[in-house]
Amino acid sequence: PDSPTQRVGERPASQFDSVRHNIPLYSLDNAFNIEEFTNWEKRWQNQLKNPVEPEYVCELKIDGSALALTYENGILVRGATRGDGETGEEITQNVKTIRSIPLKLQVENPPNRVEVRGEAFLPLETFDRINQDREANGEAPFANPRNAAAGTLRQLDSRIVDRRQLQFFAYTLYIPGEDGDRPFHTHQEALQKLQEFGFLVNPNQTICRSLEDVAQYYDRWNEERRQLPYMTDGVVVKLNDIELQQRLGFTQKAPRWAIALKYPAEEVPTTVESVT
């Protein structure tokens, strides 16, 4: 099942089945400026009996489509879309076409089960090439890389998915059943573990130990993101300490220990060409 020959299926799927996620994919609460981020920090500090000095991991928020991957004994056995967070569509045949997703974890004696979360996306250069091909064939171009990535993942024919050359950044790791003997104690250690398993992790993540550090990271990438080869629409800030994450837990919809610090939406003039 981990052979390179299994990357692309021989025949199109007839439909995608709905599957329940082994671990829910929660949404993230949003902040749109540092003041809102400061209020979020006050909220999670108030959940604790004694305030703590925060240590955050800041990561770029990739503008793509979230995937949930399941590995059993080191072999990829399921890939699913996010869906509503509780259930998604099982698209393993399409997930296998993404070359940056390992079919087999690249470690000896892998855990019995591993759950990986990450973002599938289209690099800008690839997106432009796809649109050029579509226009040459008389087809309407895709509006943006995010929609194109989501639509690509739902193609019934994995050969089409393979040709579009999606990429994948992993950002969350779960190893169920090993809570008493976790192989990592911080989120940054989990990112390192993902790399050991063979995943691509976005290289632009960093540790921030104050609001000022977070603000500098946020402002820096608001400018530099325009030079990146992929789309990003904000910064994801997570508490680094896994034990602290577990103490804070979740609301009904989102973790209390993470937030998306979004950039303002880009606004441009548009012209109404006709009204029907």
Image: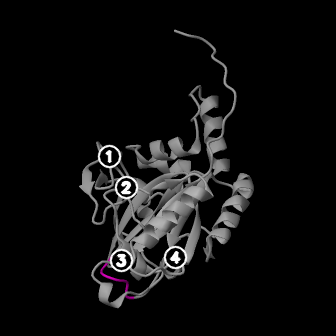
Q: Which mark is residue 93?
A: 2
Q: Which mark is residue 247?
A: 3
Quick one: SS at disc 1? loop
For the residue marked with disc 3, what is the amino acid?
Answer: Arg
Dots 2, 3 in contact, CB < 8 A: no
Among numbered discs 4 and 3, the one appearing first in the sequence? 4
Dots 1, 2 in contact, CB < 8 A: yes
Looking at the picture, how far across and down is residue 104, in whole percent? 42, 74
Gap between marks 1 and 4 measured at Cα: 33 Å
Gap between marks 1 and 2 measured at Cα: 8 Å
Dots 4, 3 in contact, CB < 8 A: no
For the residue marked with disc 1, what is the amino acid?
Answer: Ala
Give me the residue at 39% from left, 71% from top: 47
Gap between marks 2 and 4 measured at Cα: 25 Å
Where is 78 relative to 195, above or below? above
Quick check: is 58 in the magenta stretch? no
Q: Is residue 220 left or right of residue 206?
A: right
Q: Which mark is residue 102?
A: none
Q: Nearer the viewer, mark 1 or mark 3?
A: 3
Gap between marks 4 and 3 measured at Cα: 21 Å
Among numbered discs 2 and 4, the one appearing first in the sequence? 2
User: Relative to the observer, which residue lies in front, 26 or 216?
Assistant: 216
Give me the residue at 37% from left, 59% from top: 26
Among numbered discs 1 and 2, the one appearing first in the sequence? 1
Q: Which mark is residue 191?
A: 4
